[in-house]
Image (cartoon, rainbow, N blue to C red):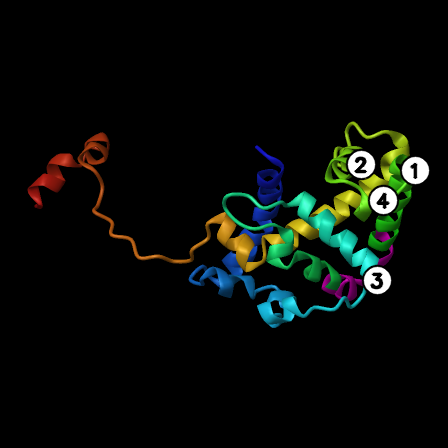
Amino acid sequence: MDRRDALKTLSLGTLAASFAMTGCEQAPEEAAKQHKFWKHVTEEDLEKWESQFFTDHEFETVRQLSNLIIPADERSGNAEDAGVPEFIDFMMLDRPQNQTPIRGGLNWLDVQCQKRFNKKFVDCTEQQQKEMLDEIAYPEVASPEMQPGVTFFNRFRDLVASGFWSSKIGIEDIGYMGNQPYDWQGCSHEALEHIGLADKAKANT
């Protein structure tokens, strides 16, 4: 299972509960609107988005980090394509308790990259960025001095996953289609035979 599929698995429980409460007859774009952000924000809004909480530098860090967590693949676009950076920006205002941990974590990431590569995270090569993230993405093997980064990354990754798989792109990526017509032809002869009803079914035809 790759990183993207692992994140999807972690997110499906929450999404399933949401769909169960609202009904499963909706198309992806309608299902996505169950979250207040997607309910009020259009694609045009995303194109014109100006950060409500993050500085320009922080927002660029959020953008790059989100795309490293959920890159594009053969099924769909990346986190940025889904509007995840804007989602996270919104969530900073909707859930103020996240502001200090996320802003502090972004700063921590820059400090660590300055120590390692003499430049901030957004100015690092993709390989350098991944090298840094490898130090904090796996709590069970992270060194003690990396624990602040581990805590930040876990929280940030949850935000990315929540934003992506509650978006239209993310719901389509899951394969969610809502109720679809299905032409059921009845049980197979083998199945009826297995439960001892094959002769009865034959007599009724």
Name the quadrant containing residue 68.
top right
* Mark closer to the chain start, 2 or 1: 1
Mark 4: amino acid: Leu
As rendered, which of 182 and 40 lies closer to the eye? 40
Mark 2: amino acid: Met
4 displayed left or right of 55: left
Element marked by disc 1: helix
Which numbered circle lies on residue 109? 4
Q: Measure the C-alpha gap from mark 4 to mark 1.
A: 10 Å
Mark 3: amino acid: Thr
Question: What residue did someone put label 2 on?
Answer: 132
Q: Measure the C-alpha gap from mark 2 to mark 3.
A: 22 Å
115 displayed left or right of 62: right
* Mark closer to the chain start, 2 or 3: 3
152 displayed left or right of 191: right
Is residue 42 in view from this perspective?
Answer: no
* Mark closer to the chain start, 3 or 4: 3
Q: Measure the C-alpha gap from mark 3 to mark 4.
A: 15 Å
Disc 4 residue crowd, few under 14, some 14–19, many 20+, Cα 10 Å: many
What is the residue that sits farthest to the top in this orientation?
A: 141
Question: What residue did someone put label 1 on?
Answer: 115
Disc 2 residue crowd, few under 14, some 14–19, many 20+, Cα 10 Å: some
Q: Is residue 191 above or below residue 28?
A: above
Question: What residue did someone put label 3 on?
Answer: 55
Q: Which is the main secondary structure of the residues drawn in magenta? A: helix
Which numbered circle lies on residue 205? none
x, y percentage for residue 123?
A: 81, 46
x, y percentage for residue 45?
A: 64, 71
Mark 1: amino acid: Lys
Circles 2 and 4 in contact, beta carbons < 8 Å: yes
Q: Is residue 18 above or below residue 157?
A: below
